[in-house]
Image (tube, helix red, strand yellow):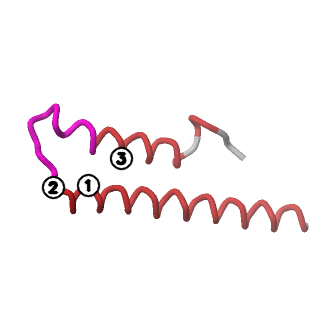
Amino acid sequence: MKAGIKTTEFWATLLGTIIVAGTAELGLNLNEASVASIAAMVITYVVGRVMNKNTQAKIDQES
């Protein structure tokens, strides 16, 4: 299993953070609903990937 910087979870979190934090630097003003939507999308993706990886690891252990 990949760890740290090699995972898509890491990159999704980093990209989401840059989008939310970086918009002010670019002169864009995101409203609270947009920020919440971006955060929810990243959180959902990361939680889903972690659950999938844990399930797969458990299946591999049993084999």
Q: Earlier in the sequence, mark 3 or mark 2?
A: 3
Name the residue rendered at 67%, 59% in the picture: 53
Q: Residue furthest top?
A: 25
Circle 3: element type: helix
Check if residue 29 falls in the magenta segment: yes
Could you tell me if the residues under marks 3 and 1 are in contact, i.e. CB atoms within 8 Å?
no
Which residue lies under the disc numbered 3? 16
Relative horizontal placement of residue 43, taking residue 38 as reference (left or right): right
Task: Judge depth for marks 3 and 1 and give the one in front.
Answer: 1
Mark 2 Cα shell of 10 Å, populated few (<14), some (14-19), many (≥20): few
Q: Residue furthest right?
A: 63
Q: Relative to the observer, which residue lies in front, 11 or 39?
A: 39
Q: CA distance from mark 2 to mark 1?
A: 6 Å
Relative horizontal placement of residue 11, taking residue 29 as reference (left or right): right
Q: Quadrant of the C terminus?
A: bottom right
Q: Earlier in the sequence, mark 3 or mark 1?
A: 3
When the figure is inspected, residue 35 is found, relative to residue 11, above or below; the finding is below
Could you tell me if the residues under marks 2 and 1 are in contact, i.e. CB atoms within 8 Å?
yes
Which residue lies under the disc numbered 2? 31
